[in-house]
Image (cartoon, rainbow, N blue to C red):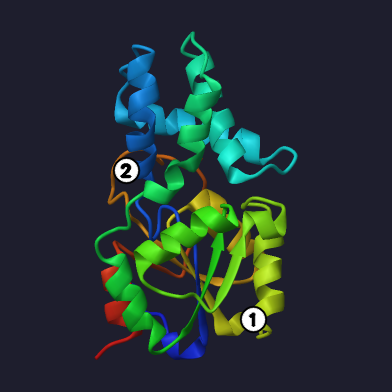
């Protein structure tokens, strides 16, 4: 495992969904009812690939709240499978983020890291939906930037730029931690940030609920517990 001098950093910024919250489990759980209602029984990885493609396309367009993005994604997924999502199905899936579970190690790792660093989050989500996830994580982030505030979705850099403005420190003092190469590491490295890749998929084939991308993080860890051990030793 490559070395990284954590003493260089004052602030750790995080992606939330996929890194701290198990969004693939949440997405699949949220899809089960509407898919079953329409007689669809696709493999999990195929569903995640379809989700990733439609989410990226929707988020690249004119800004709309994440609830609406998810509703549009569900509608597109069902349409390509020969059926249509109802307004209620779209709304329920759009709000399902509040039910997505945290990874088992996230809360303890964040609490440990918070003793040594300020914590920020840059998330492709609405303020209220993220607030529900923050409560699940048991931590109050020092700085929060949502897509609702940025009016853009990562990999657009606007969320990062807002974080820089609010943190008010040189980029060299900020370390970004994320699972998605596509949403986070590509724009973060382009902006000059050091990054840690939390490789939650653990060598599984494909890129899951995110589009495939190539980036070179400064450090790769399998989970948040490992990052906490390295960055905030006892």
Query: 183 above or below 191?
Result: above
Does label 1 or label 2 sit earlier along the sequence?
2
- Quickly name the residue at label 1: 167
> Is residue 157 at all visible to an observer of this figure?
no
Query: Quick one: 218 or 185, which is closer to the camera?
Result: 185
Quadrant where the N terminus is found in the figure: bottom left
Q: Quadrant of residue 111?
A: bottom left
Numbered disc total: 2
Are the residues flagged by discs 1 and 2 in contact, CB closer than 8 Å? no
Numbered disc 1: secondary structure: helix
> Is residue 105 at all visible to an observer of this figure?
yes
Residue closest to the far right: 62
What residue sits 53% from the left and 15% below the top? 79
Q: Position of residue 23 (x, y in %)?
A: 39, 47
3D distance between C-alphas at marks 1 and 2: 32 Å
Query: 95 above or below 87?
Result: below
Q: Which mark is residue 25?
A: 2
Quadrant where the C terminus is found in the figure: bottom left
What residue sits 38% from the left and 30% below the top? 31
């Amino acid at each position: 495992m490559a070395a990284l001098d954590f003493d260089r950093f004052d602030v750790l910024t995080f992606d939330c969904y996929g890194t701290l919250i198990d969004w693939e489990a949440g997405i699949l759980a949220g899809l089960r009812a509407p898919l079953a209602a329409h007689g669809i029984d696709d493999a999990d990885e195929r569903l995640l690939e379809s989700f990733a493609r439609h989410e990226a396309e929707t988020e690249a367009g004119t800004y709309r709240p994440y609830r609406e993005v998810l509703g549009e994604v569900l509608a597109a997924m069902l349409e390509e499978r020969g059926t249509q999502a109802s307004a209620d199905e779209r709304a329920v899936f759009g709000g399902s983020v509040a039910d997505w579970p945290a990874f088992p190690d996230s809360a303890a790792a964040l609490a440990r890291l918070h003793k040594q660093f300020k914590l920020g989050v840059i998330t492709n989500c609405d303020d209220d939906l993220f607030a529900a996830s923050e409560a699940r994580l048991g931590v109050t982030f020092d700085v929060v930037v949502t897509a609702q505030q940025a009016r853009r979705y990562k990999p657009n850099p606007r969320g990062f730029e807002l974080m820089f403005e609010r943190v008010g420190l040189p980029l060299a003092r900020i370390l970004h931690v994320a699972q998605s190469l596509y949403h986070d590491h590509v724009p973060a490295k382009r902006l000059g940030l050091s990054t840690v890749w939390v490789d939650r998929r653990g060598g599984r084939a494909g890129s899951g609920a995110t589009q495939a991308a190539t980036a070179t993080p400064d450090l790769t860890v399998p989970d948040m517990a490992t990052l906490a051990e390295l960055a905030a030793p006892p």
